[in-house]
Image (spheres, helix red, strand yellow):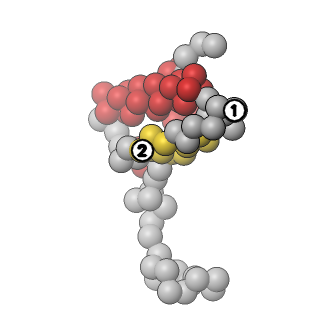
Amino acid sequence: MNSRPFHPQIPYKDPKVMAHLLGLGLDCTDGHKRITQADKFSILGGSDETHGRMTETLLKTMEDLSIKGKALEEASPDELSDIIAKNTPDS
C-alpha cells in the first residue's frame, strides 16, 4: 500500500478505478444552480446553453467509448481528448 503522508486514514485507490470527468461552467448569471451527475461524469454550473453543451458532449463521449468497448479508465488521455473534441458541438 502506498504511503499517504497527508491523509493516512484515507484508503489508497487506484486512480484508474476513480476515473471521472468533471465539467465546470462559470458563465451563469441567472442564479440557477445546474448539476448533472452520471456514473463517470459530473457537470456543475454554467448558463443553460453551456450546461446543455457540456452534457451533450460528455454523453456522446461516453457513448463513443462504449461503442469502442472501452471504459473511461481504459482510454488514454490523448484518445479521450480527441473524442471530446469530436463531440463538442459548434457554437
* Frontmost residue, 26 versus 69: 26
Q: Residue at x 46, y 53 (%)?
A: 19
* Frontmost residue, 73 versus 36: 36
Q: Give the residue type at disc 2.
A: Gln
Q: Residue at x 46, y 25 (%)?
A: 56
Q: Residue at x 49, y 42 (%)?
A: 35
Residue that protrudes farthest toward the front in the picture:
31
Q: Say which quarter of the image contains residue 16.
A: bottom left
Residue that protrudes farthest toward the top in the picture:
90
Secondary structure under badge 2?
strand
Q: Is residue 27 visible?
A: yes
Q: Nearer the viewer, mark 2 or mark 1?
A: 1
* Frontmost residue, 31 versus 56: 31
Q: How many marks?
A: 2
Where residue 54 appears, as percent x and y from the top left, is: 53, 30
Where residue 72 appears, as percent x and y from the top left, is: 41, 44
Q: Is residue 75 visible?
A: no
Q: Give the residue type at disc 1.
A: Thr
Residue position marked by numbered label 1 in the rendering: 29
Q: Dot 1: within a 10 Å radius of its alpha carbon, few (fewer than 14), some, or many (20 or more) residues?
A: few
Q: Say which quarter of the image contains residue 32.
A: top right
Residue 16 in the image: above or below residue 51: below
Q: Earlier in the sequence, mark 2 or mark 1?
A: 1
User: Could you tell me which quadrant the C terminus lies in?
Assistant: top right
Residue position marked by numbered label 2 in the rendering: 37
Residue 21 in the image: above or below residue 65: below
Secondary structure under badge 1?
loop
Q: Dot 2: within a 10 Å radius of its alpha carbon, few (fewer than 14), some, or many (20 or more) residues?
A: few
Where residue 45 appears, as percent x and y from the top left, is: 59, 40
Q: Say which quarter of the image contains residue 38.
A: top left
Residue 90 in the image: above or below residue 6: above
